[in-house]
Image: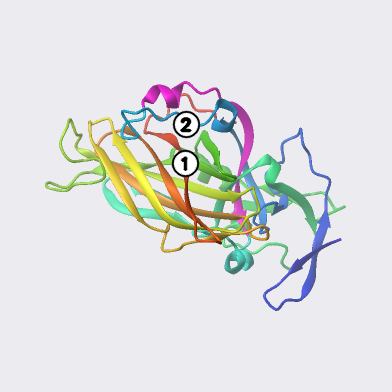
């Protein structure tokens, strides 16, 4: 039997764990627990992701010339492993207890409109992070505003299970270019693994006299291109550390290079311990060119006050959606 600790610090029964499927993809409607963050989720759609793991290739090579310009050949020369990932909904009852941002996926609703459209409580999860379970709560097995809109109870009377509605398929087809991603980048430094997943958000017409990251000078376009990037930090060593500073390099194919530095991330300086080893957040970047790349470091502090830097693996910012790996 599977029990869940609520904010009242009482255990309640939520369902029965199922046997994980190491070699078989889960289907839309599968309920699960997140192996790292512990939230309850439901699968909407499987994806094939290209995972670039720099730990398998000796890490990021930084030349003497920089540190300032990491050549694109380093980004394109890595061999990728194709692994299964899932687009999922997060149970809204678990939002207050998560060590990741639940505000969701963002994309431009219209290229002529500068506003970002947010889908609350959407996440992307690797196959190995899925712990499948069957709910025993027939009254409210899952709480999310899109749950009943996207999923319908299946005909299997032996357990509480769900199947995709036509509304889910239509929504995914309409917004596929904003929701889809194909690349995952990983790198471990001194026991801290950083995973980055970039998304192309869209573009909008640039207002006269406006500027954006990487947009000053050079051969710029008349559009501002936006990307969202999701970052997870995982403490694999177990020693208590705290993120103190971030340091970014943002290169645009228009020929510009921008440096961004500051305290913490998204207003926080998260602590990673053996008990709470992971933290996840999202941010955005814009360029006045259709492509570029980013890389950087985080400055971490040990419990004894000593500081050390960990690498953020370089990743491409691309607006070209050709060569899709979406599974139809």
Q: Position of residue 2 (x, y in %)?
A: 82, 61
Earlier in the chain: of badge 2 and badge 1, it is 2
Picture layout, residue 120 above or below residue 130 = below
Residue 75 lies within the magenta run = yes
Residue matched to label 1: 311
Closer-to-camera residue (107/65)? 65
- Residue 254: x and y in percent read 23, 31
Q: How far is the residue under mark 2 from the one under mark 1?
A: 8 Å
SS of the residue under disc 2: loop
Q: Which residues are magenta?
A: 71-90
In the rendered view of the protein, which quadrant contains the C terminus?
top right
The label number, if any, that marks residue 60 in the structure image: 2
Q: Is 297 included in the stretch rendered in magenta? A: no
State if disc 1 and disc 2 touch (CB < 8 Å).
yes
Residue 171 in the image: above or below residue 7:
above
Q: Position of residue 317 (x, y in %)?
A: 38, 35
Is residue 138 visible in the rendered image? The answer is: no
- Quadrant location of the N terminus in the rendered image: bottom right
Work out whether residue 116 or residue 261 is closer to the camera in this orientation and state it: 261
Give the residue drawn at x 49%, y 48%. Answer: 231
Residue 30, numbered circle: none
């Amino acid at each position: 039997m599977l029990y869940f600790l609520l904010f009242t610090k009482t255990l309640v029964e939520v369902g029965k764990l199922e046997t994980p499927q190491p070699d078989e993809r889960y289907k839309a409607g599968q309920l699960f627990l997140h192996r790292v963050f512990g939230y309850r989720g439901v699968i909407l759609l499987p994806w094939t992701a290209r995972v670039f793991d720099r730990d398998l290739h000796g890490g990021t090579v930084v030349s003497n010339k920089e540190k300032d310009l990491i050549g694109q050949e380093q980004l394109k020369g890595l061999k990728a492993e194709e692994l299964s990932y899932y687009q999922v909904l997060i149970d809204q009852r678990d939002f207050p207890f998560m060590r990741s941002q639940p505000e969701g996926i963002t994309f431009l609703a219209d290229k002529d409109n500068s506003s970002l459209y947010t889908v609350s409580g959407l996440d992307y999860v690797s196959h190995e992070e899925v712990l499948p379970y069957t709910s025993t709560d027939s009254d409210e097995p899952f709480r999310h505003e899109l749950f009943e809109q996207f999923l319908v109870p299946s005909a299997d009377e032996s357990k509480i299970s769900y199947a995709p509605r036509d509304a889910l398929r239509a929504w995914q087809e309409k917004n596929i270019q904003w929701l889809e991603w194909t690349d995952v980048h990983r790198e471990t430094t001194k026991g801290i693994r950083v995973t980055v997943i970039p998304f192309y958000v869209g573009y909008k017409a640039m207002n006269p006299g406006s500027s954006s990251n990487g947009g000053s000078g050079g051969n710029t376009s008349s559009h501002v291109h936006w990307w969202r990037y999701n970052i997870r930090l995982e403490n694999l060593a177990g020693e208590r550390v705290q993120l103190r500073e971030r340091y970014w390099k943002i290169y645009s194919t228009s020929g510009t290079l921008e440096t961004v530095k500051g305290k913490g991330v998204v207003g926080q300086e998260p602590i990673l311990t053996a008990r709470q080893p992971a933290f996840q957040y999202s941010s955005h970047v814009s360029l006045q060119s259709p492509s570029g790349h980013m890389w950087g470091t985080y400055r971490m502090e040990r419990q004894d006050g000593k500081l050390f830097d960990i690498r953020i693996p370089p990743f491409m910012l691309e607006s070209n959606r050709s060569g899709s790996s979406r599974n139809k």
